[in-house]
Amino acid sequence: MAEKYDYDVLYIGAGHGTFDGAMPLASQGYKVAVVEADKIGGTCPNWGCNAKIALDLPVQLKETQQQLKNIVKGNLSIDWTQNMLNKHKVIDGLPGAIEGGLKAFGIDVIHGYGKLTAAHEVQVDGKTYSADKIVVATGLRPHRVDVKGSEMAHDSKDFLNLDTLPMHIAIIGAGYIAMEFATIANAAGSQVTILMHGDRALRQFNDEYVDTVVKDLEDKGVRFIKNAKIEQIHDEQCKTTIETSDGPIFTDYILDASGRIPNVENIGLDEVGVKYDAHGIKVNDHLQTSVDNIYASGDVADTGQPKLTPTAIFESQYLTSQFTGASDKAIEFPAIPSVVFTSPRIAQVGVSVEEAKNSDEYTVEEHDMSHDWYRAITNEHIAKRAYVFDKQHHLVGATEVSPEADSVIDSILPAIALQLDKQQINKIVHLFPTIGSDAWQHL
């Protein structure tokens, strides 16, 4: 297939925006290359989802024991060093495994920094490779607060490799990363202070449920400072000090979780005419950039969709269907679920409660399940769910706050993705007793 060029498709970046589509593409006989300057697999396996959940599992075990403390005697504690060692045991082999998978499909893995030099050319460490189509999947990186001394703060990658847990951690930001890492550090014994840019945490989620999570963390000792204007960071009296408009914060460790920004600089976008802005690379409804043969996939693509692993996987697989001719249709994003791995968790999918309550197109049904028999088994005191239905009573959205929220939303996802009506929902029989059967009882 590739005659005029070295490759049919060349990907810059080796995360989920690449490999989930690259392998099936290569399996159909296309000549494919992947360029990666860092670890194969990108953020999610190495410094994101997989690494985070490996550290989080003992947190959930500790939470469960606390809920059952009158039944399961004793006090559990998390050994941070062993938890981190276990994380490395689980995670460190993933780049090699993913690279092995790519190579097994005949994909050339090129290690080095890739930069566009022409519409069909990518230069890697001085060597030029050509391709009929190029996919930019360079992802996001941590944002840095713009204050004097910001270099003293650490990012999420640093936190996920902490050998010793600091006694006090100050976290800048109140989004996914801030709230999840605050949960982990607090459960492992660190004192945590969260410095919020505004007065709301987790703005993408139901306010009531977010307030529940914030209150739970406060009850566990986490301190929240709203509207914290950070002025500078410096060392003072053997402590790292964050100067704020409300006074100094003394800490042992600063985690800058103020957001993530697209990797669009210094990869040749300006030189070849690919348009982008602070939200990422501009794409049309076929994920094409302003240069017809160059596409963008994953977190770096500005599609308006949540910048999550499931989105990247869907986009990568969509491009494979385009490149192979299996489909020429515009991309139609499904309902993409999201979750915050706090304790309790918040998960949601589809039409939000806020959107539904501001429209006469939807109805919202809210349920407190904390007294349901299944939740009573583990003494769950936080368990709330909201369903959003359209006028035909199709389930179009759902959100939950509870220790099992991720499993519940995952369970009911087919009803939303397939737009099932009441009659179809009633034909689905679940294993019993399970959280899945509990999740469907109000539909």
Image (spheres, helix red, strand yellow):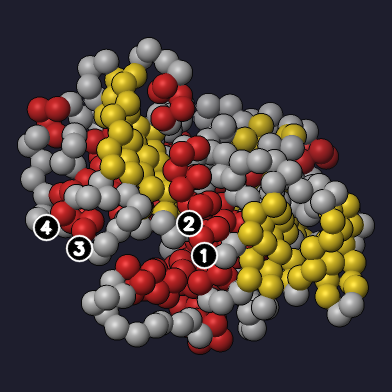
Vertical placement of 365 versus 229: above or below? above
**To which residue does mark 2 refer?**
216
Mark 2 crowd level (few <14, some 14–19, many ≥20, 10 Å Cα): some
**To which residue does mark 1 refer?**
220
Whole-angstrom CA distance, mark 2 to mark 3, is 20 Å
Instruction: Answer with the quarter of the image where residue 420 lies.
Output: top left
Left or right of 168 on screen, residue 244:
right
- Name the residue at the top extreme: 360
At x 27% / y 80%, what residue is drawn? 72
**To which residue does mark 4 refer?**
433
Left or right of 237 on screen, residue 222:
left
Whole-angstrom CA distance, mark 2 to mark 1, is 6 Å
Q: Earlier in the sequence, mark 4 or mark 1?
A: 1
At x 50% / y 85%, what residue is drawn? 79
Whole-angstrom CA distance, mark 4 to mark 1, is 31 Å
- Between label 4 and label 2, give the one nearer the viewer: 2
Instruction: Answer with the quarter of the image where residue 4 lies.
Output: top right
Vertical placement of 387 versus 149: above or below? above
Amino acid of disc 2: Asp
At x 81% / y 47%, what residue is drawn? 229
Q: Earlier in the sequence, mark 1 or mark 3?
A: 1
Q: Earlier in the sequence, mark 4 or mark 2?
A: 2
Q: Earlier in the sequence, mark 3 or mark 4?
A: 3
Instruction: Answer with the quarter of the image where residue 69 lies.
Output: bottom left
**Dot 2: what SS?**
helix
Whole-angstrom CA distance, mark 4 to mark 2, is 28 Å
Which of the labelled discs sits on residue 377, or is there none?
A: 3
**Dot 4: what SS?**
loop
